[in-house]
Image: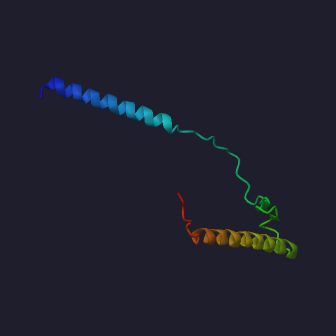
Amino acid sequence: MSKTSKITIGVIIVIIAVIVWFLMAGKNPVSVQPTSSAPAPQNAPAPASTSSEGLSTSPTDTSNAALNQDLTSIDAQLNGLASDSANIDQGLNDQPVSQGQ
């Protein structure tokens, strides 16, 4: 190979590398997040979460009423899980129907 063809191949490889880098950089832009000099609060109160049944639970409330409410929510979710599991079992045990022409 002559010196000119080696230089041409090298330039082509560099151009391809720059194009690939440009395309990859466009898909994943780097975002700079501003830093804050104020410290984050250490013991912020946790917000109450809501389950799918609309029952509200709080991770910091340990009263009997709150525990009973949490247990009711868990029971409702487990009953929904049992129903879903029964529907899945029924679907898996489904028998094929003969098709007439």
Residue found at x 55% / y 67%: 96
Is residue 76 positioned above or below 8 on the image? below
56 or 29, nearer to the observer: 56
Is residue 39 positioned above or below 72 on the image? above
Decide if residue 67 is on the left or right side of residue 12: right
Position in image of residue 49 (x %, y %): 77, 60
Position in image of residue 57 (x %, y %): 80, 65
Residue found at x 78% / y 60%: 50
Position in image of residue 92 (x %, y %): 57, 70
Position in image of residue 67 (x %, y %): 82, 74
Decide if residue 19 is on the left or right side of residue 60: left
> Which quadrant holds residue 94?
bottom right
In the displayed image of the protein, which residue is found farthest to the top? 4
76 or 44, nearer to the observer: 76
Please, which colouring scheme is shown?
rainbow
> Which quadrant holds residue 9?
top left
In the displayed image of the protein, which residue is found farthest to the front? 101
Decide if residue 77 is on the left or right side of residue 5: right
78 or 34, nearer to the observer: 78
> Which quadrant holds residue 71?
bottom right
Is residue 29 positioned above or below 86 on the image? above
